Image (cartoon, helix red, strand yellow):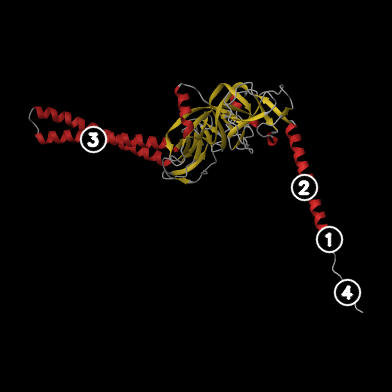
Amino acid sequence: MSETVSPPPKRSRRGLIIFAVVVLMLVALVVVHLMTRKKPVRENTAIVVTVAQATLGSMPVTLSELGTVTPIATVTVLPQLSGYLTEVGYHEGQEVQKGQFLAQIDPRQYQISKQQAEATLAKDRASLAQARADLERYTQLNERKSIAQQTFADQQFLVQQDEAAVKVDLANIAQFDLDLAYCRITAPIAGKVGLRLVDPGNYVTASSSTGIVVITTVKPTTVQFTVPQDSLASIVQRLATGAKLPVTAYSSDNSREIATGTLYAVSNQMATATGTVTLRATFANDDETLFPNEFVNVKLLVDTMQNAVLVPTAAVQSGAPGDFVYLVNPDSTVSVHKVKLGPSDGKNTVIVSGLAAGNQVVTDGMDRLNDGAKIQPAHPKSAAGPKAPAAASEAAPASSAAASPAPAASEAASS
């Protein structure tokens, strides 16, 4: 007799479904409870931040550019006549004065030519003396009508020819004197000589483009750099008042100050391709720290702002609302406060509008803040405000504030 298998009861399956639904509902309730419980805790917890007070101080307005050391004068000493170089009178890298002996070209051929010219001069002077004596005699005969008029006129012309020949001889002698002077090559300017380009024994020519040596003026020297056209107006205005704008040169890696000088020239044309204008500053360079054609970083002090509102640069943020700071309110909350920035020296930044001296701003911990967040200053009311920059020559160029994610800004009125 076969057994009949009955299907499982429907109640068991229904019970499992109900149980699963109940468990899911309990889990959802727990999650909702935990989430709703954390929110008030977070809102009520004060975030510890560092604050600083906006102060009044001075701020140098500087321009930072890349410059090139450009000597005041660089001269390639060329031979002015041809001949063998017999002597060199300088050491490579030596400083020379204007007119100092540099090299000698064999003068013998020019000395011989001068002697020949002097002999010709003596001969022509003798001929001139004879012609003048004959003219004086012919003059007396002409007065007595004892000589043909044509003979008298020819003698007058002969005297004039001999006088011209003497002048030519004198000019030739002067030319050979000049050639002999050119045989002795001297420094046309004061400066430092470079490496020797021609050794003694070589034949040099007046058409040579290589030259004997190159002399460069190193004391004083200049630095040439360019500035944007937008900055030109303020520079020209300052120069028009007679102001001496200081220029500081730094090493190529900006790690050390090399020299200080003064702006003295502005180009008369704008570079249309780059929208910049070329400026030149002069440096005494007594210690020769500025080397010709060296690349340097240049900082030009255009002006100094007085009684400017200063905040630490770390307090300035950039985001959707633009440039802003977290302003500390009297109730220990913060608000996103839009500001207009001025120059910066890296450590401090000028606030042109949006803050007043005495306002407190957050300088550290901004990544955890939002508009209206409650804070607890790490150093309440005792945070040292930004110090005014020291010497103008130590100021760095204006720089932008660091960017960070910005919350929705609440428009705050300028203090």
Q: Which residue is mark 4?
A: 4
Q: Secondary structure at mark 4?
A: loop
Name the residue type under label 2: Ala
Disc 2 residue crowd, few under 14, some 14–19, many 20+, Cα 10 Å: few
> Which mark, residue 174?
none
Q: Residue at x 78, y 41 (%)?
A: 33
**Residue placed farthest to the left in the image?**
145
Residue at 20% in and 33% down: 160
Question: Is label 1 or label 2 in front?
Answer: 1
Q: Are marks 1 and 4 in contact (CB under 8 Å)?
A: no
User: Mark 1 or mark 2, which has the lower sequence index?
Assistant: 1
Point out the image quarter for the C terminus: top right
Give the residue at mark 3: 162
Q: Is residue 348 visible?
A: yes
- Please state the horizontal and vertical placement of residue 287, each as a whole percent of the image: 59, 29
Q: Is residue 414 above or below residue 166?
A: above
Is 277 placed left or right of 397 in the picture? left
Q: Residues within 10 Å of mark 3 (few under 14, many from 20)?
A: many
Question: Helix or strand or loop: what does disc 3 sit on?
Answer: helix
For label 2, the SS is helix
Mark found first going from the N terminus, 2 or 3: 2
SS type, badge 1: helix
Residue at image x 90%, y 75%?
A: 3
Q: Which mark is residue 28?
A: 2
Q: Which residue is mark 1?
A: 11
Report the number of numbered marks.
4
On the image, the x and y values in percent for residue 50 come to 71, 29
